[in-house]
Image (spheres, grey):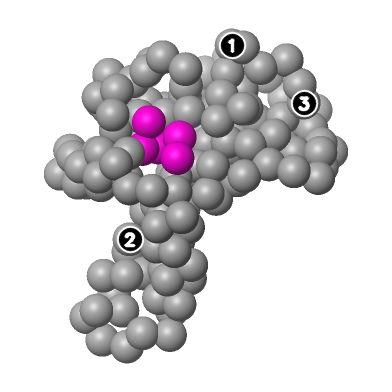
Amino acid sequence: MTNPSRYLTNGQFRGLLKLGDVFAPGGGGFPSFSELGCGEHVDEVLEYLPEDDRKALAMLLGLLRWTPKFKVRWLVRLLEFAPRVPGPPGNALRLLRTGLKGVAMSLYFSGRKGQHYSGRTPLEIIEYYVTVYTEDIAPTGGGDDLEKAAT
């Protein structure tokens, strides 16, 4: 997969795919993170991060690119114990866990897929569809309608 991100280098993007495949390896009818191609939409998540956080995440993803997959799995398992670690070390581990898992799972369960994936998304597989009911909201002509309704 080519790197679609304006925030990540090719190596950092490969690190994201490796991390995503650890969190969402596929199986049981579900695609893996990289098979789904949801990484193509990473900028939709990264553009809302503060620049310092984005750079720190990118640096970590760059390191993960060179890290063997079994060690990435080990890191993820270690981070699952973060809620039990007290004090400042626990705080740092919980923040790291939230950041890494948040990026990967936000993309995987976003409902988006890559341009080369033709299967169903994880949300379609579990038949989870988010909708907003709006039939009881009358169309408004602007702010004047709100003022009239308040009187």
Circle 2/circle 3 CB separation < 8 Å: no
Badge 3 element: loop
Q: Any mark on residue 120, and which? A: 3
Badge 2 element: helix
Q: Which residue is mark 1?
A: 115
Residue 28, x across and y down, in percent: 81, 45
- Rounded to the nearest angstrom, the CA distance separating label 1 from label 2 is 30 Å
* Of pointers 3 and 1, the one earlier in the residue sequence: 1
Q: Within the image, what quadrant is residue 55 found in?
A: top left
Residue at position x 58%, y 18% from top?
114
Prevailing SS of the magenta stretch:
helix
Who is closer to the viewer here, 124 or 33? 33
- Rounded to the nearest angstrom, the CA distance separating label 3 from label 1 is 13 Å
Q: Which residue is mark 2?
A: 96
Who is closer to the viewer here, 21 or 99? 21
Residue 66, x across and y down, in percent: 29, 41
Q: Residues within 10 Å of mark 2 (few under 14, many from 20)?
A: some
Badge 1 element: loop
- Which span of residues is magenta-colored? 14-18
Dot 1 amino acid type: Gln
